[in-house]
Image: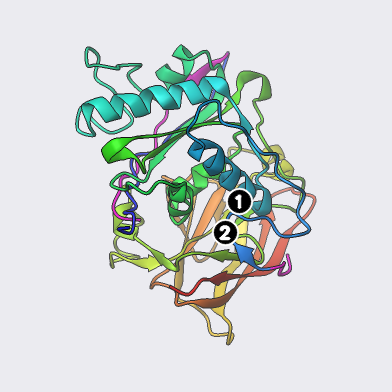
Amino acid sequence: MRRPLLLLVVAWAVAEARLGEAAEASTRITDTSKTSPAAETSVGLPSDDAPPVQAIRADDEDLRPAGAIAKLNAIRQRAGAGVLTLSSALGVAASRHAAYLEVNGLQSAANVHEETAGLTAYSGADPFVRMRMAGYRMSYASEVIGGIGSTAPDSACVDELMNTVYHAALLLSRVTEVGLAFGSGRYAGMCTIDLGSPFEARGGQVPPPGEVVTYPAPGMTVPSGTYAASAENPRPPLGLLPNAKAGAPVLVGFRNEDYIAADAATPRVVIERFALTDAGGTAVPSIVLADAGIIGSDVTLDRQLHGGFAALVPVRPLPAGRYWVTLRARIVGGRSPVQSSWCFKVAAP
């Protein structure tokens, strides 16, 4: 079978709402073809000592959504982001949009997350309208679409989406619920993932003081060390990553209890060291991108990141092998500093 292309389309996110109405701020992203060390396992599979992830049963004959959600939940659990529960309303919204794209194609609106009124299978102008039309009342929500150009009959789109900066940050965000739908025919490998937190759970999932979300998680093995930087739109800064391909990103989400308690009007996080070394102890040349609430001497502001995320991106693809991450940071006014070192592996091709 032809290796699926990673076509990362636009990712949309909406910030926490006031009075129940979500503020529809969007993050756009486009596509192309794709702590101490713990037990090493393949990406998406929990280690032996990890608590079990509850299986989610599909409502129809297509078992791929259940498999993809289980894979995403296993990744989130190991990363410290918390597992998601299945939302029938988000599933309806994702299914309706997948059906619209199948009928009308990818060029029928301004971007793949929007729909044009009057066309067959129209279900709402944008993800947030579709979610509300399906009965979902959100405090925070996002939509990610992957696997466009792939006809692979599996849930590989989750692995591909995780090998990014902006899409992966959304998949690891504060959300508590998920709905997912696959395409069919020429779009068989395409997955539409709608994520959200209901209005009643405005804070979403929040790690305790001193703990952060990390991906790749300690002991994890990722399937590829190559990140198609030119495939994401917006792509990381061209001046910092001039080549089309870079190394697999390392993401950290600082939005824990201390982060939430910090003054939002000032930088909440100071990164003192965020670095990557190979198995021999040699530093891997990398850049560090972070949202506006995170500063540091080697940190570059990236307004496409939000929600307390920073990303370390190696400037060149990572060969197969073991890598160590070192992280030292402090949350302003926080009770516990963030100090951690962990390893992950890149699988052989």
Residue sitting at x 61%, y 37%: 174
Give neighbour class at mark 2: few <14, some 14-19, many 20+ (Cα, 10 Å): many
* First in residue order: circle 2 vs circle 1: 2
Residue sitting at x 51%, y 47%: 169
Q: Position of residue 94 (x, y in %)?
A: 44, 27
Amino acid at circle 1: Ile
Q: Quadrant of residue 241?
A: bottom left
Q: Quadrant of residue 35?
A: bottom right
Q: CA distance from mark 2 to mark 1?
A: 7 Å
Q: Which residue is mark 1?
A: 75
In which quadrant will I find the C terminus? bottom left
Q: Is 56 placed above or below 121 here?
A: below
Amino acid at circle 2: Val
Dot 2 falls on a residue whose secondary structure is loop
In the foreground, 349 or 239 = 349
Looking at the image, the residue that sits furthest to the front is: 61
Residue sitting at x 50%, y 57%: 311
Stretch in magenta: 20-39
Residues at discs 2 and 1 in contact (Cβ within 8 Å): yes
